[in-house]
Amino acid sequence: MFRTPTTPQQIDVWRQVNSEHESLEFKEAKTQFDFDTLLRYCVALGNEGGGTLLLGIADKPPRPVVGTSAFPDIVKTTGQLFKKLHFRVDIEELAHPDGRVLVFHIPSRPVGQPYDLTVMGLT
C-alpha cells in the first residue's frame, strides 16, 4: 500500500498527544524488542481498527526520542511478521534528529473477522 512517508515532524506531532490510545503506541526499545510482543501489539492494534506502533520513543511524557537498534533488517522483519500474522505490516525506518525510530503501520482487521492469537499459533 502506498502511503506518504512519515516525517520527523509527524513523529513530533504524535509525541505531543496527551496519552497513548487504541491506535497509537510508543515503546522505548532502545536495544531490542521481543518479537512475540511485537506480534501481540500488531494483533491488538489490528483488532482495534489499525494503528501505529513507534519504537525508539519513550512511552511516558514528554516522550523523548531515545532511538532504537531493534529489528535492524526491516525487510526481514516485514517478512517474518507476514509469515506469522498472515497480514502485511508496513515498517518505516526513520532517521529522526534524536535517533532511529521504527514506525509500524498496522492495518485494521477485516470486518467481522477478528485476529486471533491462538489461530495464528501465538498464545
Image (tube, helix red, strand yellow):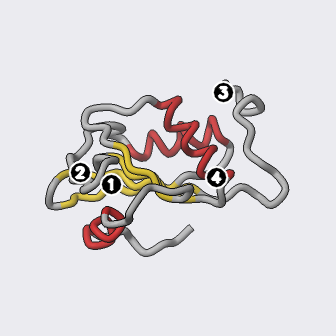
Q: Which residue is mark 3?
A: 122
- Classify mark 2: helix, strand or loop: strand
Question: Which residue is labeled 4 in the image?
Answer: 46
- Amino acid on which disc 3 is placed: Leu
Please tell me whether mark 3 or mark 1 is closer to you in this view. 3
Label pair 4/3, CB-CB below 8 angstroms:
no
Mark 3–mark 1 Cα distance, whole angstroms, equals 26 Å
User: Which is closer to the viewer, label 1 or label 4?
Assistant: 4
Whichever of callouts 4 and 3 sits on the residue coming sooner in the sequence is: 4
Real-space CA distance between mark 4 and mark 3, rounded to the nearest whole angstrom: 15 Å
Lower position in the chain sequence, tag 3 or tag 1: 1
Question: Residue beneath label 1, please?
Answer: 93
Q: Residues within 10 Å of mark 1 (few under 14, many from 20)?
A: some
Q: Amino acid at mark 4?
A: Gly
Label 2 sits on residue? 100
Tell me which numbered mark, 2 or 3, is placed earlier along the sequence. 2
Labelled pair 2, 3 in contact (Cβ < 8 Å) = no
User: Do we see residue 44 in this rendering?
Assistant: yes
Whole-number angstrom distance, CA of label 4 to CA of label 2: 24 Å
Res. 91 in view? no
What distance separates the C-alpha of mark 1 from that of mark 2?
7 Å
Pointers 1 and 2 in contact (CB under 8 A)?
yes
Q: Position of residue 68 (x, y in %)?
A: 26, 42
Q: Residues within 10 Å of mark 4 (few under 14, many from 20)?
A: many
- Please give the name of the residue rendered at 32% of the width and 71% of the height, measured from the top-left corner: 13
> Do labels 4 and 2 touch, CB within 8 Å?
no
User: 80 above or below 59?
Assistant: above
Q: Quadrant of the C terminus?
A: top right
Cα separation between marks 1 and 4: 20 Å
Q: Residue at x 39, y 57 (%)?
A: 92
Residue at 29%, 58% (x, y): give it. 94
